Image (cartoon, rainbow, N blue to C red):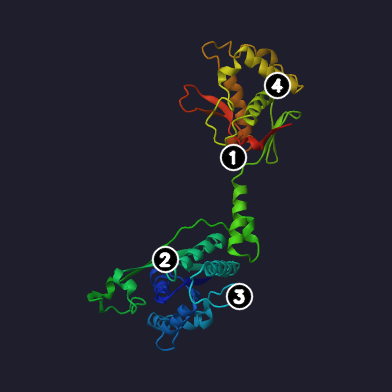
Amino acid sequence: MREILISVAGLTPQIITETLYHLTQVRKPPATISEVWVITTTAGKQKAERELLHPRHGHFFQFCREYDIDAKKILFGHEQIVVVRNKDGQPLGDVRTPEDNAALADFVTTFVRKKALNPDIALHCSVAGGRKTMGLYLGLALQLYGRPHDTLSHVLVSPPELESDPAFYYPPNQSKRITVKGRKLHTSQIRVELAEIPILKLRGKLPALDTGEVPYSDLVRRAQQDYALLNTPPQAVVDTRALSLLVNGRRIRLSPLETAVYVLFAEARRSSCGKTGCPGCTKCTFAASDFLGEEGVTRVRQALRSLKAKDARLEELRGWGAREPTDPEKRFREVRSRLNRKIQRGLSGETWPALYTIASLRPPDADRVRYGIRLDPRLLSIR
């Protein structure tokens, strides 16, 4: 697999050689860089070409000679120092306006997307140089299009005085004493590290990212829509004719009694306060004791009759738990437990099974648990 360094740079081209030094001399195992690409402005290109690519005095070639690297095996020349262009195709001297910023976002995103199309290439992206927005967009582009083996990093140099020293490009291969801003130090004290920046990689997760070249703002808008869909649970349909619950193409078979109980909870949720995070108000939920009195028994019987189904347990509804006088709510909890187990098994592997079960909730300042369906009422229907 070929390894490519992509870096943003302003007027500090030394971050290129510093990054190369760490990747090839410090990292274990060392990287074998086959290409170097620099994204910059017109001023940054001029400085990078002058200080890195001069045949004799360029620090890139000096670095390669000093560390016995064949520079001819690394694709890095004037064409690999690319200048951001605006919407009219004109090179940018700096990023000063909102239009320049939008052009930068589009340019960097498109550049990374194209490089990431090749599965045989690993990208090492460095955000150390250039304006902060340049590094930001490089990181965002890798977040959108990066693969598991691609990396994002920031170069760190110590002692800190070296970071602003225009003469420092990389630690020399032969140790020696140098003076930096009046301070004498030995080059063996120099440390160049790459701090890898963990990012959440979204490639393959959002359909919008599979589209072709589009403006960055449009891409983010489309990806945000895709992300919203990922976070919206599928609709649930209580099918009273088939005595089942339908969720995301899965049919969960229920007994008549379980269906009747679920219908009561679904009706309560559908005529509820409407809050997706309802803590258990009396409109959305029931207490177990609500099913024990004559009114509760009648409610369940009516729900059963509306299903036009016969259930041998219909006559057992009077006095749920009468056989267990010390725990009069046991009968309801048994039905709820069986119902929830069926839903959890039926939705195994899905993201949101708990939203479809009859959950136990404790409203603020309530002394008793209440029970209800937590799904957004707009996603719950009965037919």
Q: Nearer the viewer, mark 3 or mark 2?
A: 3
Residue of label 3: 88
Q: Are marks 3 and 4 in contact (CB under 8 Å)?
A: no
Which image quadrant: the N terminus? Answer: bottom right
Q: Are marks 2 and 4 in contact (CB under 8 Å)?
A: no
Residue of label 2: 154
- Residue 303 is labelled as 4
Residue 95 position within the rendered picture, expressed as x and y whole percent measured from the top left = 49, 71
Residue 13 position within the rendered picture, expressed as x and y whole percent measured from the top left = 42, 77
In the picture as drawn, the residue positioned furthest to the bottom comes out as 56
Q: Nearer the viewer, residue 169 or 10?
A: 10
Q: Amino acid at mark 3?
A: Asp
Q: Quadrant of residue 146?
A: bottom right
Q: Amino acid at mark 2?
A: His
Q: Amino acid at mark 4?
A: Ala
Q: Residues within 10 Å of mark 4 (few under 14, many from 20)?
A: many
Residue of label 1: 352
Which image quadrant: the C terminus? Answer: top right
Q: Are marks 3 and 2 in contact (CB under 8 Å)?
A: no
Q: Residues within 10 Å of mark 3 (few under 14, many from 20)?
A: few
Of helix, strand and loop, which one carries label 4?
helix
Q: Amino acid at mark 1?
A: Trp
Q: Are marks 4 and 1 in contact (CB under 8 Å)?
A: no
Residue positioned 41% across, 89% down in the render: 56
Q: Residues within 10 Å of mark 1 (few under 14, many from 20)?
A: some
Can you see residue 307?
Answer: yes
| Circle nearer the N terminus (2, 4) | 2
| Circle nearer the N terminus (3, 4) | 3
Q: Nearer the viewer, mark 4 or mark 1?
A: 4
Of helix, strand and loop, which one carries label 3?
loop
